[in-house]
C-alpha cells in the first residue's frame, strides 16, 4: 500500500514536536550556529531498508536547506556497513533530527527485513505472506507499507475491507440466529471464514467463501485439509484460497510451506519486529 503524504507529514511533525527538536539544549549550547557538516546513514547489519522518504521529510520539515541524497529506495536490500543516505547542511539541523529520522527508518526497516525473511522461506511453494491487523494503534499505514516493501501482501486494512468471520463471530451466531445468516451477505466483497478443524472446514464451504483461514492447524492437519479440498474441487475450479494463521513464526514457517497453501499470515511481522540497526555518522565538519 502507498504512503499518504498528508499523513506522513502529520506524523513527522508530531514526532519532531515530541522530541522537542527546536529545544535541543545540547546542540544549541555547544554546536556553533554557522557550523556545517556532512553525514551518512548506514546499515550496521544486513536487512531490507524502509522509511527513506519519511526520514527525508523529517529533515525537510526542520530545515529545507538540508541536502538529502538517498542511495537506496524502500525495499532495497542493504549489506552491513552500506550507505543508505548522504546528508549535507547545518550541523545543528542534522544533529537535532538524527534520532527522529532513525526511529522511523529503523522501525520500518525491521518490519521489512522480517517480511523478506518469511517471503524467501515460502515463495518456492507459491505461497504469499500476509500481514494482519495486529498493528500499533494509529501506525497501521506505516507498518503495512513496510510489509509491502519486504515483499509481503497486505490483508484487509481495517474491518471495512472484507468479510472475515472468525471464531467469536461463529460462537455468537451458533447461539443466536444460526450460521445460515452467512448466506445473506450482500455485495461482491471478499468473504473469508476461519475454521479450527476439518468438520468446521466442511461446514464453512457450504457458504461459498472466497477464502478459508485454517487457524492453528498443524502441518499434518493442513495436508489433510488440502487433500479434502482436492477431492471436493478436483479441477481446482471455485476452490477457495487457503490462508494459514496461528502459531506460525519466521522460525517455524518452513514447516508450513506446503504446496497448495495460498497465504500465510504472520502477526509477528508488525507486533514483534526488531528494529534494524541503523546509524547516522558525521563524516565531515566545515
Image: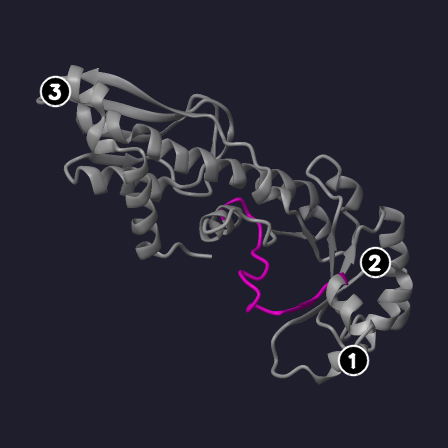
Residue 163 in magenta? yes
Majority secondary structure in the magenta region: loop
Q: Within 10 Å of the Cα at label 3, are there few (<14), some (14-19), or many (20+) other Cα atoms?
A: few
Residue 143 in magenta? no
Q: Is residue 48 above or below residue 143?
A: above
Rendering quarter of residue 35: top left
Regarding residue 99, the answer to whether it shows in the image is yes
Q: Is residue 49 above or below residue 181?
A: above
Task: Calculate the distance from the C-alpha at mark 3 to the C-alpha at mark 2.
Answer: 63 Å
Q: Sequence-wise, which precedes: disc 3 or disc 1? A: 3
Q: Secondary structure at mark 3?
A: loop
Q: Sequence-wise, which precedes: disc 3 or disc 2? A: 3
Q: Nearer the viewer, residue 175 or 196?
A: 175
Residue at the extreme left: 34
Kindly identify which residue carries mark 3: 35
Residue 177's label in the rendered image is: 1
Kindly identify which residue carries mark 2: 196
Amino acid at each position: 500500500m502507498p504512503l499518504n503524504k498528508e499523513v506522513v507529514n502529520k506524523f513527522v511533525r508530531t514526532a519532531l514536536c515530541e522530541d522537542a527538536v527546536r529545544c535541543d539544549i545540547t546542540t544549541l549550547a555547544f554546536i556553533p550556529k554557522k557550523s556545517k557538516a556532512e553525514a551518512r546513514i548506514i546499515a550496521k547489519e544486513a536487512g531490507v531498508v524502509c522509511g527513506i522518504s519519511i526520514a527525508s521529510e523529517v529533515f525537510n520539515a526542520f530545515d529545507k536547506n538540508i541536502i538529502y541524497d538517498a542511495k537506496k529506495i524502500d525495499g532495497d536490500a542493504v549489506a552491513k556497513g552500506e550507505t543508505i543516505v548522504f546528508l549535507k547542511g547545518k550541523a545543528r539541523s542534522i544533529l537535532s533530527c538524527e534520532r527522529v529520522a532513525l526511529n522511523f527508518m529503523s522501525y520500518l526497516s525491521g518490519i521489512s527485513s522480517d517480511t523478506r525473511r518469511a517471503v524467501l522461506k515460502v515463495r518456492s511453494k507459491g505461497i504469499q505472506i500476509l500481514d494482519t491487523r495486529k498493528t500499533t494503534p494509529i501506525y497501521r499505514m506505516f507498518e503495512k507499507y513496510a510489509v509491502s516493501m519486504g515483499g509481503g501482501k497486505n490483508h484487509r486494512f481495517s474491518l471495512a475491507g472484507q468479510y472475515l468471520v472468525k471464531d467469536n463471530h461463529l460462537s455468537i451466531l451458533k447461539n443466536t440466529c444460526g450460521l445460515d445468516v452467512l448466506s445473506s451477505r450482500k455485495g461482491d466483497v471478499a468473504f473469508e471464514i476461519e475454521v479450527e478443524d476439518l468438520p468446521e472446514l466442511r461446514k464453512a464451504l457450504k457458504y461459498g467463501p472466497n477464502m478459508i483461514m485454517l487457524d492453528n492447524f498443524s502441518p499434518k492437519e493442513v495436508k489433510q485439509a488440502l487433500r479434502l479440498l482436492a477431492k471436493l474441487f478436483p479441477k481446482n475450479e471455485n476452490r477457495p484460497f487457503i490462508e494459514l494463521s496461528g502459531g506460525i513464526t519466521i522460525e517455524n514457517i518452513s514447516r508450513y510451506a506446503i504446496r497448495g497453501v495460498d497465504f500465510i499470515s504472520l502477526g509477528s511481522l508488525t507486533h514483534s519486529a526488531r528494529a534494524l540497526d541503523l546509524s547516522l555518522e558525521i563524516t565531515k565538519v566545515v
